[in-house]
Image (cartoon, rainbow, N blue to C red):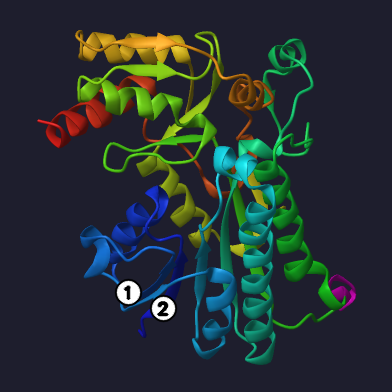
Amino acid sequence: MAEKQVLVTGACGEIGQALVQSLAKRGGYRIFSADLAPLPDAIASLVDEHFQGDLVIKAKYFYDYDFDVIFHLAASLSSTAEKSPEVAHRINVDGTMLLLSMAAYRSEKYEKEVKFLFPSTIAVYGFPSLKEKTAAGQIKENEWNNPQTMYGCTKLHCEKLGLYYSSFMGQRHLDPNPPTMLDFRAIRFPGLISAFTVPNGGTSDYGPEMLHAAAQFKPYVCFVREDTKISFMAMQDAVKSLLMLMDAPHENLTYPVYNIAAFSLTAREFSEWSLKSFPEAKITFEPNIQRQGIVDSWPEDLDDSMARKEWGWKPDYDVERFFNEYFLPEIRKRYE
């Protein structure tokens, strides 16, 4: 069987590196990557060709490639996007639209399915107050879609663009025999934590930042309140979910956008785990008004029942297993 060609944008990021390694381990793929940065040594040997530079400029080159699957991970994250909203919109929306357009064009012209996997975020949700956030509990995909950040706005916009290109462009849904078309699938991720890469630019990064600092015996000033609570997930589960959704039969999927969840923690609980494992760690709390407001607008937990029912989603790591079997052993080795 011929190898499938896979494009991974944002390949140098946390999810990107883990995803490239998982695809290479699976076998059967020719992996192409794109990022502003050069490939790190950890994945350089696993990639056939790397496109370094601005994705909005580089996207035109992809018309010459026959991609079967596109994982579009490149994005300006939440805190970074708030500092430069116009730049974030260009990266997140313009870059995504160019890739969707390219994938839809090639799919239709050559009558070949192209799967487009898109990591969305809990930032697409937005609560006007903590009282309403706490009362809401677990959130379904069609609830509280009122993003309060540029990151959340752009991600929700891109979800709608994916739905348009895959289902409505040219009103294909009205055609009794629609042509082969782009197959867009998205996952709304909670905060992601990796022991192997240091987070950068995400508002949910206070959890992993705290743990990485504690393992290095560096003082850490947490930028949210101790009672701040949102959903988190191990990086391995995030990559697993992308591969599971890629493999899911199209006929099983009723909607292209899915919540997934693993465990919810407060910032205080993160500090307790840090101090339990690294008693000499120095952790203090000095909430930043802007970043605190962002996290307060996100749900405490996500209802992922649709993903569990339609493509068998289930995380491998609950909070105990995440810390005891994955994060703490690996981070100790990293900073030993």
Q: How many marks are shown on the rendered structure? A: 2
Q: Is residue 287 magenta?
A: no
Q: Is residue 174 magenta?
A: yes
Whole-percent x, y for residue 139 in the image: 69, 28
Image quarter of residue 298: top right
Disc 1, SS: loop
Magenta residues, dominant SS class? helix
Where does label 1 land, which residue? Answer: 28
Whole-percent x, y for residue 265 in the image: 47, 17
Q: Nearer the viewer, residue 246 or 221?
A: 221
Disc 2, SS: strand
Task: Identify which amino acid the numbered label 2 is placed on.
Answer: Lys
Which portion, as a residue range, is magenta?
A: 171-175
Assess disc 2: are there few (<14), some (14-19) or many (≥20) residues with their C-alpha within 10 Å of its C-alpha: some
* Image-based side of 124 in relation to 14, left or right: right
Q: Residue at x 63, y 85 (%)?
A: 106
Q: Nearer the viewer, residue 157 or 304?
A: 157
Q: CA distance from mark 2 to mark 1?
A: 6 Å
Residue 253 seen in the figure: no
- The answer to whether mark 2 and mark 1 are in CB contact below 8 A is yes
Look at the image and tell me in which quarter the C terminus lies.
Answer: top left
Q: Residue at x 37, y 58 (%)?
A: 12
Relative to 189, does residue 103 appear above or below in the rendering?
below
Task: Identify which amino acid the numbered label 1 is placed on.
Answer: Gly
Relative to 21, does residue 295 appear above or below in the rendering?
above
Image quarter of residue 250: bottom right
Which mark is on residue 4? 2
Residue 83 seen in the figure: yes
